Image: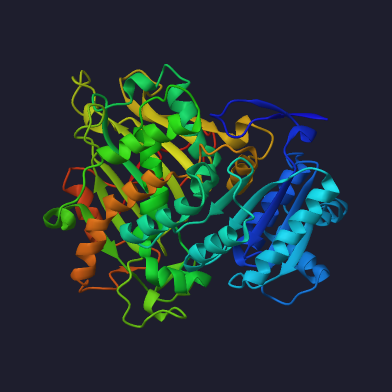
Amino acid sequence: MTNEYYSGPFKKPKMKSISELQPTILTIFGGDGDLTRRKLIPALYNLYIDGFLPGKFKILSVDQRDVSQDDYNKRHYEGVNQFSRRGKADKEKWKEFEQYITYVQADITNNKSYNQLKSIFSDIDKEWKVEASRIFYMAVSPNFIEVLANHLNKAGIAGNSEKHRIVVEKPFGHDLESAKNLNKVLQGIFSESQIYRIDHYLGKETVQNLMAFRFANALFEPLWNRNFIQQIQITVSENVGVENRAAYYEQAGAVRDMIQNHILQLICLIGMEPPVDLQANSVRDKKLEVLHAIRHFSEDNVYVNAVRGQYDKGWIEGNKVKAYREEDNINKESLTETFAALRFFIDNWRWQGVPIFVRTGKRLQETTSYITIQFKEVPHKIFPSGVRELVHPNLMVISIQPQMGIRIHFQAKKTGLDMQLKPVDMIFNYSDSYSNDPPDAYETLLNDVMLGDATLFMRSDQIEESWSIIMPILDVWASNPPQKFPNYPSGSWGPPEAEALIAHDGFYWHTFTEPLDINPNAPSLAKKQS
């Protein structure tokens, strides 16, 4: 059986027979945790359904809970039913898939647990008559990463740089110093090629499509520079609160949780130069160039370029919700920011002087993620007075979630005898263009790990440079506690200071409230935020 494997729109097509994929043992530390139930097992189940798992494959779910194999399978079957993009699992297919799963009760801080794993690996290799590839997925709290790495090293079960890989979830460090220390520990045990620092945002179909959009089309790349683009905006908003992540979020905040990783990676994809090829290091080198070119904040200009906020009580979708300080397990006088808006500049020939505004937060009006490219105005307006005042800027809107697509917003003549202009849209919508559902981000990334493709994963120098960019903001904010928290009501678009930040340059935040449907009667989507 042969499949055409295409892992993301900008990757090389690969012809892979299932039998050609390396026999693989995937060990998940934190195998009964929330991430495994919500993301990893549903993703692996979908890969199985689509024929993208090796013929010889085993999942070792390692956790300390005392639970039977049947109970574990039942719990994760319910997780697939609830969280899989396909909806409820096919019972027969699940029965086949669950044969791949073995639950291992073990204490990850105890040497004996790794001797137990070593024995299991040996037995599987003997059964398969081949040395299997080993993937160690660290779906655990960040403070256990170093513990796991040292135990793996001591047990001698992850030392083959060709066949053994580790996957590290974000957050990778709490600040620049801790990120450097963690890199030092991991690189002292594993080769850099073995370390896969995962950022699920990079596995999203629309995010991957940015490179195809930019580098496969002669139409757009010549315009992708300071000569034609006036400003760039990135919005990543959530209408939910901290939910079950209170303990983590209270220590992290919006900048660490979203900007240091997800949003800076989006800036890299928007700003990077064309790589010479699509090999992992070629792409990652170009991303690193962008990070090096991002203007660092000085202590004096942090408050000119950065705004923070914390949500108050309010209304979300008709329901009254709590303030952040009223949430369970949150300090009643917490100074953690749940909103951040920043202005970045990339100091190079392509982007000099083009502001990049980003905003992200919780308990905002909508859950949505999109990138807005605003082009410069035409150099000479030939239309009569009364018409030219109604001309809107040309926009390109790249929607990441909840819908996926790209919209180009431009001017056209309105039907009639007079010269009247009307904003119109050209739309590429994934759901209209493709009949199959796009893979979940974790499906793409897990398959890439199995194939040894590190293109969509963070390298150590990228991680450290990302932290170095945001550390001045975090340091200034830590030494100057906010005086007005909470400062925006739930259900709004954040504090008024975020409006002042972008208004300083003569702009306003673009919000997009209508779906990416091709509707010729739809009004303009570019709306000034009230």
Residue 434, image x and y in percent? 64, 32
Residue 82: x %, y % from top left: 69, 60
Relative placement, left or right, of 25 versus 194 is right
The extreme left residue here reads: 300
Q: Is residue 197 above or below residue 404?
A: below
Number of numbered labels in the structure image: 0
Nearer to me, 138 or 271: 138
In this rendering, position of residue 62 left or right of residue 513: right
Residue at 86 percent across and 52 percent down: it is 96
Is residue 293 among the parts visible in the rendering?
A: yes
Where in the figure is residue 117, as x and y percent of width and height?
71, 62
Quarter holding residue 302? bottom left
Residue furthest right in the image: 92
Q: Dividing the image into 4 quarters, which one contains the C terminus?
A: bottom left
Colour treatment of the image: rainbow
Name the residue rendered at 38%, 20% in the picture.
Answer: 416
Residue drawn at (44%, 59%), measured in percent from left and top? 171
Picture quadrant where residue 182 is located: bottom left
Q: Image quarter for residue 448?
A: top right
